[in-house]
């Protein structure tokens, strides 16, 4: 039996509306990986389409949690970051990386800050500069095209894209420091949507696509990132991990679209987990 691997998942918690830790924890755990959580904030719901939500900032707790874990000599096979709400949190998580990085573990940063050509309203343009510095510390980053443009200081391109454009973007992102890039929201036509991967060590570029389902679905980036990390920690190569993650995310979106559910509530990833585990060869 293989040793149980452990992830430190650093995201916010939205009590309702599936995203962030309420997505990462069940998906990564289902993949046979111990999931330790470091919450950056607690919200009653996520902020996409809801009003009147509560928000409790946990910035003041992050360093104390990190210090306690260090005192217990806890080690992680991977560190996975998502939504970070402030410059101070960026600095604290940079320190967390320095504290818990080893020669063998993996740091995966999802630079959550923008979508559809716009920086999230809670962030200033300077936040993108801070996020770029955090990405420099990562082994893998998984931006969408809006985030990628902000990270490399280029105008946003809404697509459709060409292979030449995508591949140039991947290589520019890699020059920030991370040796592996997964770029989400890739499409060459209106029929398919997926991701592109780049491994700077080998020069390999690969694509993973599924049938495009119209609409915008909250939390899908967190579903994708959690599935990607799960596959990587189950020893799948980057391009195969992306295929598994794209397939799992698309299946969750399709279930939600077929049911006609309120898109604010998140996607139905739960009922796709058995097929996901078969893809991981765990069933």
Image: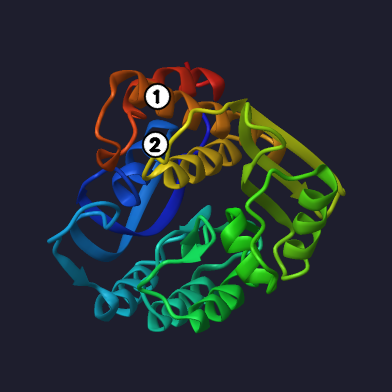
- The location of residue 151, given as percent across then percent down, is 63, 70
Asked if 10 appears above or below 187 in the picture, the reply is below
**Residue depicted at 86% across the width and 48% down the height:** 202
Q: Where does residue 138 sit, x and y in percent of width and height?
A: 62, 65
Q: Is residue 131 left or right of residue 35?
A: right
Q: Secondary structure at mark 1?
A: helix
Taking depth in this image into account, of 22 and 281 the one nearest to the observer is 22
Residue 213 placed where, x, y %? 49, 28
Nearer the observer, 29 or 118: 118
Q: Position of residue 178 (x, y in %)?
A: 70, 63
- Mark 2: few/some/many CA within 10 Å (<14, 14-19, 20+): many
Seen in the picture, residue 41 relative to 21 is either above or below; the reply is: below
Name the image quarter holding residue 83. bottom left
Q: Earlier in the sequence, mark 2 or mark 1?
A: 2
Residue drawn at point x = 30 percent, y = 37 percent:
263
Q: Which residue is mark 2?
A: 27
How far apart in space, not on screen, are marks 2 and 1 (Cα)?
Answer: 8 Å
In this rendering, the answer to whether 94 lies above or below 80 is below
Q: Is residue 110 shown left or right of residue 153?
A: left
- Indicate whether 154 appears above or below 33: below
Q: Which element carries disc 2, helix, strand or loop?
A: helix
Dot 1 surroundings within 10 Å: few (below 14), some, or many (20 or more)? some
Can the viewer see residue 184 in this picture?
yes
Image colouring: rainbow
Pointer 2 and pointer 1: residues touching (CB < 8 Å)?
yes
Residue sitting nearer the eye, 205 or 33:
205
Residue 99's label in the rendered image is none
Q: Which of the numbered marks, if any, corresponds to residue 273?
A: 1
Give me the residue at 21% from left, 62% from top: 42
Kindly tell me whether residue 235 is visible in this rendering.
no
Residue nearest the viewer, comparing 127 with 272: 127
The structure residue drawn at horizontal position 31% and vertical position 74%, both measured from the top left corner, is: 62
């Amino acid at each position: 039996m293989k040793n149980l691997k452990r992830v430190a998942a650093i995201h916010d918690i939205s009590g309702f509306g599936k995203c962030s830790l309420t997505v990462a924890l069940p998906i990564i755990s289902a993949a046979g990986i111990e999931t330790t959580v470091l919450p950056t904030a607690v919200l009653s719901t996520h902020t996409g389409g809801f009003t009147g939500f509560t928000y409790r900032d946990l910035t003041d707790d992050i360093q104390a949690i990190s210090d306690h874990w260090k005192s217990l000599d806890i080690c992680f096979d991977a560190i996975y970051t998502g939504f970070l709400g402030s410059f101070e949190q960026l600095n604290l998580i940079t320190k967390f990386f320095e504290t818990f990085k080893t020669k063998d573990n993996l740091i995966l940063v999802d630079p959550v800050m923008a979508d559809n050509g716009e920086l999230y309203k809670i962030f200033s343009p300077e936040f993108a500069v801070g996020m770029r510095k955090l990405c420099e510390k990562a082994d893998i980053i998984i931006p969408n095209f809006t985030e990628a443009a902000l990270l490399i200081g280029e105008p946003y391109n809404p697509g459709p894209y060409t292979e030449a454009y995508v591949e140039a973007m991947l290589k520019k992102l890699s020059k920030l420091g991370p040796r592996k890039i997964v770029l989400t929201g890739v499409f060459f036509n209106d029929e398919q949507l997926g991701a592109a991967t780049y491994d700077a060590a080998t020069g390999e570029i690969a694509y993973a696509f599924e049938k495009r389902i119209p609409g915008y679905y909250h939390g899908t980036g967190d579903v994708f990132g959690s599935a990607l990390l799960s596959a990587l920690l189950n020893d799948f190569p980057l391009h195969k991990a992306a295929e598994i993650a794209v397939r799992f995310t698309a299946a969750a979106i399709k279930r939600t679209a077929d049911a006609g559910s309120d898109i604010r509530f998140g996607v139905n990833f739960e009922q796709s987990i058995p097929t996901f585990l078969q893809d991981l060869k765990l069933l």
